[in-house]
Image: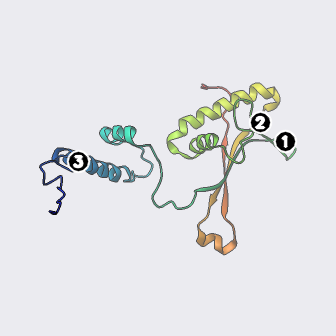
């Protein structure tokens, strides 16, 4: 009985691994993908939202997803977020109404992502000032149409955001977040609205 020797496919003239061309294409794709990943996480200068390289944008559109995140943000920025329309009634009290149009529905708590993203961007990003102004003008017009002449006076949109504090500060006094309200005055109902 002779010893049976098994043939190695590589020695027999066949190729067990893909051809060199396929290996080269795979290597080129992997290198391009690494370059794309590195370019996509390079932060843009503050307050500057310019579009990147069209080739990289097209590649990201086809094989990726747009994500906005910062490598060093380890905690959520906001602990709470609420919005409402406010008006002093002349007797020292405040009249409040919802901010969600149409119908001035109250802002949903806990936040629904659709409203959260809309109002967070509307109220905090510098680039969205035209949209914020358009929202405030539209709100003023609808408020006047809904409440009639008694809506007079100065109405404001109040945004109360509870910003999450770092562990260093929250250990000192036990407060997880710090409430920072911002007030945006509604313009007079005249003017162009969307």
User: Which of the 4 image quadrants contains residue 121?
Assistant: top right
- Please identify the residue farthest to the right as the structure is shown: 91
Q: Residue at x 66, y 61 (%)?
A: 178
**Nearest to the observer: residue 188 or residue 194:** 194
Precedes in sequence: disc 3 or disc 1:
3
Residue 75, how many percent across, how many down?
Answer: 56, 61
Mark 3 neighbour density, 10 Å: few (under 14) some (14–19) many (20 or more): few
Disc 3/disc 1 C-alpha distance (Å): 71 Å
Q: Determine whether label 1 and label 2 are within 8 Å by CB.
A: yes
Circle number at residue 69: none
For numbered disc 1, what is the local secondary structure?
loop
- Please identify the residue farthest to the front as the structure is shown: 1
Q: Determine whether label 2 and label 3 are within 8 Å by CB.
A: no
Mark 2 neighbour density, 10 Å: few (under 14) some (14–19) many (20 or more): few
Q: Mark 3 vs mark 1: give the one in front.
A: 3
Circle number at residue 90: 1
Disc 1/disc 2 C-alpha distance (Å): 9 Å
Q: Mark 2 vs mark 3: give the one in front.
A: 3
Please identify the quadrant where the C terminus is shown. Answer: top right
For numbered disc 2, what is the local secondary structure?
loop
User: Which of the 4 image quadrants contains residue 145?
Assistant: top right
Precedes in sequence: disc 2 or disc 3:
3
User: Which of the 4 image quadrants contains residue 173?
Assistant: bottom right
Figure check: 31 above or below 143? below
Which residue bears the numbered disc 3?
28
Figure check: 52 above or below 163? above
For numbered disc 3, what is the local secondary structure?
helix
Which residue bears the numbered disc 2?
153
Please identify the quadrant where the N terminus is shown. Answer: bottom left
């Amino acid at each position: 009985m002779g010893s049976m020797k098994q043939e190695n496919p590589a020695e027999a003239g066949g190729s067990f691994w893909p051809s060199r061309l396929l290996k080269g294409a795979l290597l080129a794709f992997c290198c391009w993908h690494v370059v794309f990943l590195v370019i996509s996480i390079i932060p843009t200068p503050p307050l500057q939202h310019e579009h990147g390289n069209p080739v990289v944008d097209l590649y990201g559109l086809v094989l990726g997803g747009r994500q906005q995140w910062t490598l060093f943000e380890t905690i959520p920025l906001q602990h709470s977020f609420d919005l409402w329309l406010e008006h002093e009634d002349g007797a020292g009290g405040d009249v409040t109404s919802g901010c969600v149009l149409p119908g001035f529905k109250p802002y949903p708590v806990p936040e629904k992502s659709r409203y959260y993203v809309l109002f967070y961007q509307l109220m905090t990003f510098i680039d969205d000032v035209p949209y914020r102004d358009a929202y405030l003008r539209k709100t003023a017009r609808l408020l006047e149409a809904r409440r009639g002449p008694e809506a007079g006076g100065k109405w404001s949109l109040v945004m109360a955001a509870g910003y999450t504090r770092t562990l260093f500060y929250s250990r000192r006094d036990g407060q997880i977040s710090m409430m920072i309200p911002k007030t945006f005055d509604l313009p007079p109902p005249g003017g162009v609205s969307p």
